[in-house]
Amino acid sequence: MVHHLSGGAWGMAGRRIWEAGTRTLPLMALLFLPIAFNLDTLYAWARPEAADDHILHLKAAYLNAPFFYLRAVLFFAIWGGLAYLLNKWSREQDEQPAQLIGPQDRRFRLLSAPGLVIFVLSITLMSVDWVMSVDPHWYSTIFGVLMIGGQGLATMAFTLVVLAALVKHEPMSRVALPGVVHDLSKLMLAFTMLWAYFAVSQLLIVWSANLPEEIPFYLERLQGPWQSISIAILLLEFTAPFLLLLWRDLKRKPHVVRRVAILVLVMRVVDITWTIGPVFRHHGSTLHWLDFAVVLAIGLPWLAVFWRSLAGRPLVPARDPYFKEAMAHVR
């Protein structure tokens, strides 16, 4: 949706990758079912004893199972509706006989403007529901945008990894030019800085306020066994990618920037584990091999569906009326 509003050659290379990613939503809805059926195992607010907790009692109007399920259905409906329309119109665009600008092309922008706002709001609420509420006594008003920044960072990293795998294959080789890879790498650098800004802002706000319901989140993660993970996140998710992506030549080489992107993706998994893990680890342990086993158990089926979906459509939106104009600026 950002590309439909802004245009540019960078989106022409990544558009079909992102569309294929949205077509995995049915699988993600299926994978959400174990969470839905085990709320009381994952979320303290869903257990009967939560009624005796004063703070959870005050939050019960929002944190309750029926409302949680309703919001989850609404999230998937919003994402599915946006994905369906964008993919449907993109397929229709591929089938049109010529690159002509018409009402069928303007509808991308007409949907993307309000759709982007709705999407950001839904991701913010999803982050509160599915991630932040695993520790229902803790809260952060910046947590939603922090997760959005992390999602954008992971998206750019994954896009560059896929482009590097396809860069030697037609027709992607005619689109994934050094200038396009450079633009996508700059976006990954921008999201790296944006994510870091939100992360530091949250830390400073919580640390300076020093409130008893907020500060334990960082005390538990910046001391003891999780401290080494915190240092790794600082060095490998921000410092190393930030410094490497400052080099212009590196950003123009897909097989080189791919290594940075893979590092970012791995550290995003570690970061999410760092955010959620301490709630369930009460005996001083940090990362466990099962954490990575779960990632593989979810990630491998997702990748299989993604690659199959990507192969089922043209890799390049060559019928987009802005395609030639956009690519002319990077040749």
Image: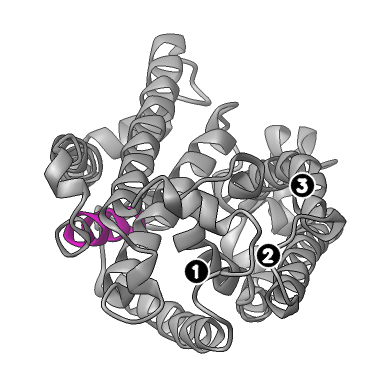
In the picture of the structure, the residue carrying the numbered disc 3 is 115
Disc 2/disc 3 C-alpha distance (Å): 25 Å
Task: Report the residue at 40% width, 84% height from top.
Answer: 300
- Picture coordinates of residue 91 (x, y %)? 71, 76
Magenta stretch: give its range. 258-269
Type of amino acid at the residue the image marks with label 2 = Gln
- Picture coordinates of residue 128 (x, y %)? 63, 43
Q: Is residue 146 visible?
A: yes
Q: Which of marks 3 and 1 is nearer the N terminus?
A: 1
- Picture coordinates of residue 74 (x, y %)? 83, 58
Q: Circle 3: is it few (<14), some (14-19), or many (20+) Cα within 10 Å?
A: some
Q: Is residue 279 visible?
A: no
Disc 1/disc 2 C-alpha distance (Å): 21 Å
Depicted 280 relative to depicted 316: above or below: above
Q: Is residue 114 left or right of residue 331?
A: right
Type of amino acid at the residue the image marks with label 1 = Ile
In the picture of the structure, the residue carrying the numbered disc 1 is 17
In the picture of the structure, the residue carrying the numbered disc 2 is 99
Give the main secondary structure of the magenta stretch: helix
Q: Earlier in the sequence, mark 1 or mark 2?
A: 1
Q: Does the magenta stretch include residue 198?
A: no
Type of amino acid at the residue the image marks with label 3 = Gly
